[in-house]
Image (spheres, coloured by chain):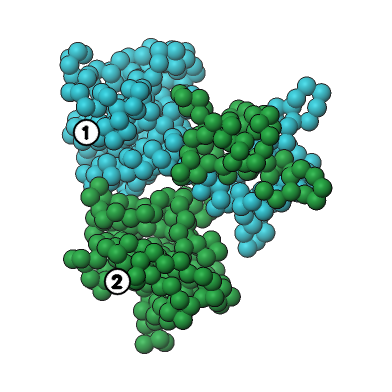
Chain colours: A cyan, B green
Amino acid sequence: MTQRAGGRPPVTRRVLDILGAFSAEHPALSITQIARRAGLPLSTAHRLTGELTCWGALERDAGGLYRVGLRLFEVAALAPRGPALREAAMPFLEDLYEATHENVHLAVLDGLEVVYIERISARDAVHVFSRVGGRWPAHATGVGLAMLAHSDRDLQERAIAAPLRRFTDRTIASGPRLRRALAEVRRTGVAISDGQVETFALSVGAPVFGPDDTVVAAVAIVVPNTGWDARSLTPVVRASARGISRALGAPRAVRPPETAMHDR
Amino acid sequence: MTQRAGGRPPVTRRVLDILGAFSAEHPALSITQIARRAGLPLSTAHRLTGELTCWGALERDAGGLYRVGLRLFEVAALAPRGPALREAAMPFLEDLYEATHENVHLAVLDGLEVVYIERISARDAVHVFSRVGGRWPAHATGVGLAMLAHSDRDLQERAIAAPLRRFTDRTIASGPRLRRALAEVRRTGVAISDGQVETFALSVGAPVFGPDDTVVAAVAIVVPNTGWDARSLTPVVRASARGISRALGAPRAVRPPETAMHDR
């Protein structure tokens, strides 16, 4: 936790650190756990948790443990890069889902990581690690490569220079390889991530653009890589990304496909 | 805003009031608007908003306005009555969606209001007012009636005694009528709300139960009431609600339909 020079952190920070104490691995916490994970004295944790619970940002379950509350969900539903984006994208995601009945992802970029905004999965779809609200390194995913390739040059160079975590033998784990992969995404209009996170999963992603023509999200289909050919999924994923971009008011989505015109 | 006797409200409360200043009608706010809506001096609003933005709970858009941030979306994704519930329900909601290609709702009860956790809508579905994270009075909706009918007796009596807002000629707007409607829901296993919110929309809802056998959510199909018969939707909505209950570990979902046994 960041401390102010010679003093305690501001209360805002302590309140937010309590919220940040909850994670996918630890969605239910006791006061003692909250205090330890947020780095706060027990009495402070007790008082602030009480105030958060009173407002509805936290809830107490039947076993007395604290969990993230419904009121926080309501406020977070207003996040433009969360549910608001999802709302515009949903009809297109549904169409993508019906095309394959596997997994469909919608994600945004936060630094060098993607954050999943939506996931539609069939009951018997190929298993994927993604989770709504979850993060994953951008270089290893179809949605991440699709967004990185269209991000500003500085961010791309940061990604190429960064240590790239390897998940499988096929993960893009070197800067030069990532540079080539990003160029390929710009050339073809889609990002194909085959066996990069799990050896058996194939992801085909495409970038979504906003009203100012910058990349704001990416959409992807994730299928088992046995029985599916990335080329057969490319047109539907590109069409879906263009449809979402158009719904968001992106100028390029009303022009003919840009990549096909000058790169091919 | 609640004030402590003779003093300023606690900082936690002021931080939360800043978050609460954002709404569906006002998703983007200037510092001046934040200060006014949260009832704070401009200097305080400025400082706290800065701290919230630094953490990622708020974000500044290209026009300099503040919006709810991605980090808050990530934390809120851990809410057990929000995305965690949605995750368990999603495959069943997809099946429901494919049965009609109209609107599918998943909601929870908060006092006498429902909060929508998920909405799947076709591009050309009948228009509905629901919004993920949005609230609506329980007595007027299929999901709300389904949950109220299986809530504890005290809450039901509070709902029956409360003023019931009328949206159309067909809204259940009297206590005795609500009491009969709730009994009917328990008898049939589904809640049918026909033209109660908008004259042209028909909602068929069913309750979802949790591991302790209490009602935790409801699912509904919303279709135009011309061309659809509620009776034709009843089996699929009931089956879906039972499927979600079973996925959540509800004991009654593994027994035969309970309402059909002793109420008929």
Do the residues at discs 2 and 1 belong to one chain? no
Q: Residue at x 80, y 27 (%)?
A: A7
Residue where numbered disc 1 is placed: A239
- Tell me the element at label 2: helix
Q: Mark 2 lies on which chain?
A: B
Residue B212 x, y percent position in the rendering: 54, 69
Q: Residue at x 25, y 35 (%)?
A: A243
Query: In the rendered image, is residue A167 in sight?
Result: no
- Tell me the element at label 1: helix
Q: Residue at x 44, y 39 (%)?
A: A82
Q: In which quarter of the image is the C terminus of chain B?
A: bottom left
Where on the picture, by quarter, is residue A223? top left
Q: Which residue is drawn at 44% across and 31% down?
A: A114
Amino acid on which the number 2 mark rests in the picture: Thr
Marks 2 and 1: CB-CB under 8 Å? no
Q: Label 2, label 1: how many angstroms apart (C-alpha)? A: 36 Å
Q: Nearer the viewer, residue A193 or A63?
A: A63
Q: Which chain carries label 1?
A: A
Residue B121 x, y percent position in the rendering: 30, 51
Q: Which of B174 and A227 is in front in this view?
A: B174
A28 in relation to A184, above or below: below
Q: Which mark is residue A141?
A: none
Residue where numbered disc 2 is placed: B234
Where on the picture, by quarter, is residue A93? top left
Classify residue A23 as left or right of residue A89.
right
Amino acid on which the number 1 mark rests in the picture: Ala
Q: Dot 1 surroundings within 10 Å: few (below 14), some, or many (20 or more)?
A: some
Q: Dot 2 surroundings within 10 Å: few (below 14), some, or many (20 or more)?
A: many
Residue B165 x, y percent position in the rendering: 46, 66
B58 in relation to B103, above or below: above
